[in-house]
Amino acid sequence: PGYSVAPEARKVGLMFQDFALFPHLSVLENVAFGLRGMAGKGRKRRARELLAQVDMSGHAESYPHMLSGGEQQRVALARALAPRPRLMLLDEPFSSLDATLREQVREDVIAVLRATGTPVLMVTHEADEAVRVADQIHVMLDGRILQSGTPAQLYARPASPFVASFFGPLNRFKGWVLAGLVSTPLGPIEVPDMADGTPVVVLIRPEALRLLRDGGASPFRFRVQRVRDLGINRVLQLELPGGPPLTARLTSAAEFVEGDVVAVEVD
Protein backbone atom coordinates (compact mmCIF):
# COMPACT_ATOMS: atom_id res chain seq x y z
CA PRO A 1 0.00 0.00 0.00
CA GLY A 2 1.24 3.47 -0.85
CA TYR A 3 3.96 2.09 -3.11
CA SER A 4 3.79 2.07 -6.88
CA VAL A 5 6.20 1.14 -9.67
CA ALA A 6 6.01 3.16 -12.86
CA PRO A 7 4.75 1.07 -15.81
CA GLU A 8 8.02 1.43 -17.72
CA ALA A 9 9.92 0.06 -14.70
CA ARG A 10 7.80 -3.04 -14.12
CA LYS A 11 9.66 -5.32 -16.55
CA VAL A 12 6.35 -6.59 -17.98
CA GLY A 13 5.93 -6.96 -21.74
CA LEU A 14 2.49 -6.76 -23.34
CA MET A 15 1.31 -7.98 -26.73
CA PHE A 16 -1.96 -6.26 -27.56
CA GLN A 17 -4.86 -8.00 -29.26
CA ASP A 18 -4.68 -5.55 -32.19
CA PHE A 19 -0.83 -5.30 -32.23
CA ALA A 20 -0.97 -1.49 -31.62
CA LEU A 21 2.11 -0.74 -33.70
CA PHE A 22 2.98 2.95 -34.17
CA PRO A 23 2.02 3.74 -37.79
CA HIS A 24 4.48 6.66 -38.13
CA LEU A 25 7.48 4.58 -37.04
CA SER A 26 9.40 2.03 -39.10
CA VAL A 27 9.56 -1.59 -37.99
CA LEU A 28 13.02 -1.01 -36.53
CA GLU A 29 11.85 2.11 -34.69
CA ASN A 30 8.81 0.27 -33.33
CA VAL A 31 10.99 -2.48 -31.87
CA ALA A 32 13.47 0.03 -30.42
CA PHE A 33 10.71 2.15 -28.84
CA GLY A 34 11.01 0.65 -25.35
CA LEU A 35 14.81 0.87 -25.22
CA ARG A 36 14.94 4.49 -24.10
CA GLY A 37 17.74 3.91 -21.59
CA MET A 38 20.23 2.68 -24.18
CA ALA A 39 22.59 4.55 -26.49
CA GLY A 40 21.46 4.91 -30.11
CA LYS A 41 23.77 2.25 -31.54
CA GLY A 42 22.91 -0.16 -28.73
CA ARG A 43 19.20 0.37 -29.30
CA LYS A 44 19.48 -0.39 -33.01
CA ARG A 45 21.67 -3.42 -32.39
CA ARG A 46 19.20 -4.85 -29.85
CA ALA A 47 16.25 -4.11 -32.15
CA ARG A 48 17.94 -5.88 -35.07
CA GLU A 49 18.68 -8.89 -32.82
CA LEU A 50 14.98 -9.20 -32.02
CA LEU A 51 13.93 -8.78 -35.64
CA ALA A 52 16.30 -11.60 -36.56
CA GLN A 53 14.74 -13.80 -33.86
CA VAL A 54 11.27 -13.32 -35.33
CA ASP A 55 12.51 -13.62 -38.93
CA MET A 56 11.70 -10.01 -39.82
CA SER A 57 15.20 -8.63 -40.52
CA GLY A 58 14.29 -7.90 -44.13
CA HIS A 59 11.49 -5.53 -43.07
CA ALA A 60 13.44 -3.23 -40.73
CA GLU A 61 12.79 -0.10 -42.81
CA SER A 62 9.17 -0.97 -43.68
CA TYR A 63 6.15 0.63 -42.01
CA PRO A 64 3.31 -1.31 -40.30
CA HIS A 65 0.78 -0.66 -43.09
CA MET A 66 3.14 -2.42 -45.52
CA LEU A 67 3.05 -5.68 -43.52
CA SER A 68 0.64 -8.61 -43.40
CA GLY A 69 -1.18 -9.48 -40.18
CA GLY A 70 1.28 -12.25 -39.35
CA GLU A 71 4.25 -9.93 -39.97
CA GLN A 72 2.74 -7.24 -37.74
CA GLN A 73 2.30 -9.91 -35.05
CA ARG A 74 6.01 -10.74 -35.20
CA VAL A 75 6.99 -7.08 -34.95
CA ALA A 76 4.70 -6.62 -31.94
CA LEU A 77 6.37 -9.61 -30.28
CA ALA A 78 9.87 -8.25 -31.00
CA ARG A 79 8.90 -4.86 -29.57
CA ALA A 80 7.54 -6.42 -26.38
CA LEU A 81 10.63 -8.62 -25.93
CA ALA A 82 13.21 -5.93 -26.67
CA PRO A 83 13.50 -4.56 -23.09
CA ARG A 84 14.00 -8.15 -21.77
CA PRO A 85 10.79 -8.34 -19.68
CA ARG A 86 10.57 -10.67 -16.69
CA LEU A 87 7.00 -11.57 -17.71
CA MET A 88 5.05 -11.42 -20.97
CA LEU A 89 1.29 -10.80 -21.05
CA LEU A 90 -0.53 -11.89 -24.22
CA ASP A 91 -4.09 -10.60 -24.57
CA GLU A 92 -5.80 -12.90 -27.12
CA PRO A 93 -2.83 -12.19 -29.40
CA PHE A 94 -3.92 -14.36 -32.34
CA SER A 95 -7.67 -13.67 -32.47
CA SER A 96 -7.43 -11.12 -35.32
CA LEU A 97 -5.67 -13.56 -37.67
CA ASP A 98 -7.45 -15.95 -40.01
CA ALA A 99 -7.47 -19.63 -39.00
CA THR A 100 -4.65 -20.83 -41.29
CA LEU A 101 -2.32 -17.95 -40.47
CA ARG A 102 -3.18 -18.09 -36.77
CA GLU A 103 -1.82 -21.60 -36.30
CA GLN A 104 1.50 -20.89 -38.04
CA VAL A 105 2.07 -17.53 -36.32
CA ARG A 106 1.12 -18.99 -32.94
CA GLU A 107 3.68 -21.78 -33.29
CA ASP A 108 6.37 -19.29 -34.34
CA VAL A 109 5.59 -16.87 -31.50
CA ILE A 110 5.55 -19.57 -28.82
CA ALA A 111 8.81 -21.02 -30.16
CA VAL A 112 10.49 -17.61 -29.78
CA LEU A 113 9.12 -17.15 -26.26
CA ARG A 114 10.29 -20.62 -25.22
CA ALA A 115 13.73 -19.95 -26.72
CA THR A 116 14.08 -16.73 -24.70
CA GLY A 117 12.89 -18.47 -21.53
CA THR A 118 10.33 -15.73 -20.89
CA PRO A 119 7.40 -16.68 -18.62
CA VAL A 120 4.10 -15.99 -20.41
CA LEU A 121 0.57 -15.36 -19.17
CA MET A 122 -1.81 -15.63 -22.13
CA VAL A 123 -5.54 -14.93 -22.12
CA THR A 124 -7.59 -16.87 -24.66
CA HIS A 125 -11.18 -17.97 -25.18
CA GLU A 126 -10.07 -20.80 -27.48
CA ALA A 127 -9.74 -24.11 -25.64
CA ASP A 128 -7.78 -25.65 -28.50
CA GLU A 129 -5.30 -22.78 -28.36
CA ALA A 130 -4.86 -23.11 -24.60
CA VAL A 131 -4.22 -26.85 -24.89
CA ARG A 132 -1.69 -26.41 -27.71
CA VAL A 133 0.25 -23.61 -26.02
CA ALA A 134 0.06 -23.93 -22.24
CA ASP A 135 2.14 -25.83 -19.72
CA GLN A 136 -0.45 -24.86 -17.10
CA ILE A 137 -4.08 -23.81 -17.66
CA HIS A 138 -6.31 -21.82 -15.30
CA VAL A 139 -9.99 -22.04 -16.28
CA MET A 140 -11.87 -18.93 -15.17
CA LEU A 141 -15.54 -17.98 -14.86
CA ASP A 142 -16.86 -14.65 -13.57
CA GLY A 143 -13.41 -13.62 -12.38
CA ARG A 144 -12.76 -16.80 -10.37
CA ILE A 145 -10.36 -19.63 -11.13
CA LEU A 146 -12.42 -22.83 -11.18
CA GLN A 147 -9.58 -25.27 -11.78
CA SER A 148 -5.86 -25.27 -12.56
CA GLY A 149 -3.68 -27.99 -14.01
CA THR A 150 -1.97 -29.32 -17.09
CA PRO A 151 -4.09 -29.75 -20.22
CA ALA A 152 -4.11 -33.52 -19.65
CA GLN A 153 -5.26 -33.14 -16.03
CA LEU A 154 -8.13 -30.80 -16.92
CA TYR A 155 -9.26 -33.03 -19.78
CA ALA A 156 -9.16 -36.27 -17.77
CA ARG A 157 -10.43 -34.98 -14.40
CA PRO A 158 -12.50 -31.80 -14.76
CA ALA A 159 -13.78 -30.44 -11.45
CA SER A 160 -17.11 -29.16 -12.81
CA PRO A 161 -19.38 -29.35 -15.87
CA PHE A 162 -18.10 -25.92 -16.95
CA VAL A 163 -14.48 -27.10 -16.98
CA ALA A 164 -15.50 -30.26 -18.81
CA SER A 165 -17.35 -28.22 -21.45
CA PHE A 166 -14.23 -26.06 -21.91
CA PHE A 167 -12.94 -28.79 -24.23
CA GLY A 168 -16.05 -28.87 -26.43
CA PRO A 169 -19.68 -30.04 -26.48
CA LEU A 170 -20.80 -32.91 -24.28
CA ASN A 171 -23.54 -35.52 -24.14
CA ARG A 172 -25.42 -34.90 -20.87
CA PHE A 173 -27.73 -37.23 -18.96
CA LYS A 174 -29.43 -36.70 -15.59
CA GLY A 175 -29.95 -39.61 -13.24
CA TRP A 176 -29.66 -41.02 -9.73
CA VAL A 177 -27.12 -43.33 -8.18
CA LEU A 178 -28.37 -46.83 -7.44
CA ALA A 179 -26.04 -49.58 -6.26
CA GLY A 180 -23.03 -47.62 -7.48
CA LEU A 181 -24.47 -47.14 -10.98
CA VAL A 182 -26.30 -44.46 -12.96
CA SER A 183 -28.63 -45.59 -15.73
CA THR A 184 -28.22 -43.77 -19.07
CA PRO A 185 -29.45 -44.40 -22.65
CA LEU A 186 -25.94 -45.74 -23.30
CA GLY A 187 -26.06 -48.21 -20.44
CA PRO A 188 -25.09 -48.09 -16.77
CA ILE A 189 -22.17 -45.83 -15.75
CA GLU A 190 -20.18 -46.74 -12.64
CA VAL A 191 -20.23 -44.18 -9.80
CA PRO A 192 -18.41 -45.95 -6.97
CA ASP A 193 -17.88 -42.89 -4.72
CA MET A 194 -21.47 -41.61 -4.37
CA ALA A 195 -24.29 -42.71 -2.08
CA ASP A 196 -27.48 -44.28 -3.41
CA GLY A 197 -30.13 -41.70 -4.29
CA THR A 198 -27.61 -38.96 -5.14
CA PRO A 199 -28.79 -36.95 -8.18
CA VAL A 200 -26.00 -36.63 -10.75
CA VAL A 201 -25.30 -35.37 -14.24
CA VAL A 202 -23.38 -37.76 -16.48
CA LEU A 203 -21.16 -36.05 -19.06
CA ILE A 204 -19.81 -38.10 -21.96
CA ARG A 205 -17.50 -36.57 -24.55
CA PRO A 206 -18.37 -37.16 -28.24
CA GLU A 207 -14.98 -38.81 -28.77
CA ALA A 208 -15.78 -41.32 -26.00
CA LEU A 209 -18.46 -42.98 -28.14
CA ARG A 210 -17.45 -45.95 -30.28
CA LEU A 211 -19.77 -46.74 -33.18
CA LEU A 212 -20.14 -50.25 -34.58
CA ARG A 213 -22.14 -51.50 -37.52
CA ASP A 214 -25.51 -53.04 -36.66
CA GLY A 215 -24.73 -56.47 -35.31
CA GLY A 216 -22.00 -55.32 -32.92
CA ALA A 217 -21.82 -56.52 -29.34
CA SER A 218 -23.51 -53.47 -27.79
CA PRO A 219 -27.29 -53.72 -27.31
CA PHE A 220 -27.60 -49.92 -27.58
CA ARG A 221 -28.49 -48.99 -31.16
CA PHE A 222 -29.29 -45.64 -32.70
CA ARG A 223 -30.01 -44.23 -36.14
CA VAL A 224 -27.55 -41.76 -37.68
CA GLN A 225 -29.42 -38.46 -38.18
CA ARG A 226 -26.65 -36.30 -39.57
CA VAL A 227 -23.01 -36.57 -40.61
CA ARG A 228 -20.74 -33.52 -40.67
CA ASP A 229 -17.34 -33.91 -42.31
CA LEU A 230 -14.75 -31.71 -40.57
CA GLY A 231 -11.67 -32.91 -42.42
CA ILE A 232 -9.70 -35.12 -40.05
CA ASN A 233 -12.84 -35.72 -37.97
CA ARG A 234 -16.48 -36.50 -38.58
CA VAL A 235 -19.23 -35.45 -36.18
CA LEU A 236 -22.32 -37.66 -36.16
CA GLN A 237 -25.67 -36.93 -34.57
CA LEU A 238 -27.56 -40.02 -33.44
CA GLU A 239 -31.31 -40.07 -32.95
CA LEU A 240 -32.21 -40.48 -29.28
CA PRO A 241 -35.95 -41.05 -28.75
CA GLY A 242 -37.35 -38.64 -26.18
CA GLY A 243 -34.21 -36.54 -25.95
CA PRO A 244 -31.70 -34.36 -27.82
CA PRO A 245 -29.53 -36.25 -30.32
CA LEU A 246 -26.32 -37.90 -29.21
CA THR A 247 -23.09 -36.51 -30.62
CA ALA A 248 -20.15 -38.72 -31.60
CA ARG A 249 -16.79 -37.56 -32.97
CA LEU A 250 -14.91 -40.08 -35.12
CA THR A 251 -11.91 -40.05 -37.43
CA SER A 252 -12.68 -39.24 -41.03
CA ALA A 253 -11.87 -42.85 -41.96
CA ALA A 254 -15.07 -44.00 -40.23
CA GLU A 255 -17.60 -44.77 -42.96
CA PHE A 256 -21.11 -44.04 -41.72
CA VAL A 257 -23.92 -42.31 -43.60
CA GLU A 258 -27.26 -40.82 -42.61
CA GLY A 259 -29.83 -43.52 -41.98
CA ASP A 260 -27.35 -46.16 -40.78
CA VAL A 261 -28.29 -47.99 -37.60
CA VAL A 262 -25.25 -48.33 -35.36
CA ALA A 263 -24.41 -49.96 -32.06
CA VAL A 264 -22.78 -47.62 -29.54
CA GLU A 265 -20.25 -48.40 -26.81
CA VAL A 266 -18.81 -45.96 -24.27
CA ASP A 267 -15.05 -45.86 -23.86
Image: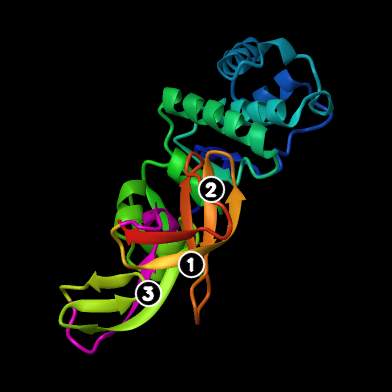
In-image side of 207 versus 89 (left or right):
left
Label 1 – label 3 distance at C-alpha: 31 Å
Q: How is the image coloured?
A: rainbow
**Res 28 seen here:** yes
Indicate which disc, 2 or 3, sits on the residue closer to the N terminus: 3
In-image side of 55 versus 65 (left or right):
left
Residue that carries the numbered disc 1 in the rendered image: 141
Residue 117 belongs to the span the image colors magenta: no
Residue that carries the numbered disc 2 in the rendered image: 234
Question: Which quarter of the figure has residue 189?
Answer: bottom left
* Residue 114 horizontal/vertical position (percent): 43, 28
Q: Is the residue marked by circle 1 packed among few (<14), some (14-19), or many (20+) residues within 10 Å?
A: few
Q: Nearer the viewer, mark 1 or mark 2?
A: 2
Q: Nearer the viewer, mark 1 or mark 3?
A: 3
Q: Decide which of 220, 63 is in the foreground and name it.
A: 220
Callout 3 amino acid: Pro
Callout 2 amino acid: Arg
Which residue is farthest bottom? Answer: 197
Question: Which quarter of the figure has residue 97?
Answer: top right
Q: Secondary structure at mark 3?
A: loop
Residue 199 belongs to the span the image colors magenta: yes
Where the C terminus falls, by quadrant?
Answer: bottom left
The magenta stretch is 194-216
Q: Decide which of 8, 27 is in the foreground and name it.
A: 27
Residue that carries the numbered disc 3 in the rendered image: 185
* Residue 150 horizontal/vertical position (percent): 33, 47
Q: Decide which of 112, 199 is in the foreground and name it.
A: 199
